[in-house]
Amino acid sequence: MDTFSILEKEEDGIAVIVFDGYCAKEGGAALQKHTQGILHTEKNEIIIDFTNCSVISSPGMAALLEIVMEVVDDSKGKLYLIGLDKSKKQFLQMTGVLPFAETAASIGEACQRIRGKK
């Protein structure tokens, strides 16, 4: 069983999901469920904070690809990923998550970029 926790909060009116721990099969599925819940509230701008995420495994990456498609393609929204170290960023680029999802250095920067694009 994956060891993880997910916290949902709002920053400047934008949904933020904070992922803590190991993002594998169960963590990825839980992350996708939280994202879908946000999308059902008519919000299509989401920030996912991976600062305290130890690892994103292949099943976690598959869930992230689904999340990207749901937010960006299906809902015509914006998805920002923050807290990515070099290896996570490279993995996300190799698997095609980036550039569909964007990256930012902080929640504040992601909020500013989202607000600037409206």
Image: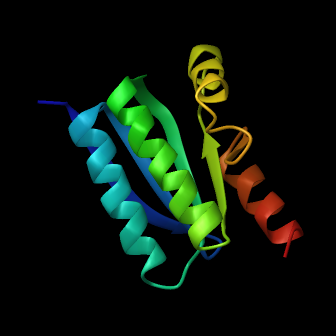
Name the residue nearer the viewer: 2 or 9: 2
Write the residue at 51% across / 63% down.
Answer: 70
Q: Which residue extends farthest right?
A: 116
Which image quarter: residue 2?
A: top left
Residue for point 39% across, 68% down: 36
Residue at 47% of width from left, 75% of height from top? 39
Taking the spot 88% from the left edge, 67% from the top edge, the residue there is 116
Horizontal and vertical percent position of residue 43: 55, 79
> Total number of numbered labels?
0
Residue 84 in view here: yes
Q: Position of residue 85 (x, y in %)?
A: 60, 21
**Left or right: 24, with 71 as reference point:** left
- Taking the image as shown, residue 19 lies to the left or right of residue 24, namely right
34 or 107, nearer to the observer: 34
Q: In this rendering, is residue 117 above or below 2?
A: below
Where, quadrant-wise, is the C terminus in this rendering?
Answer: bottom right
Q: Position of residue 26 (x, y in %)?
A: 21, 40
Q: Would you place residue 88 above or below residue 67 in this image?
A: above
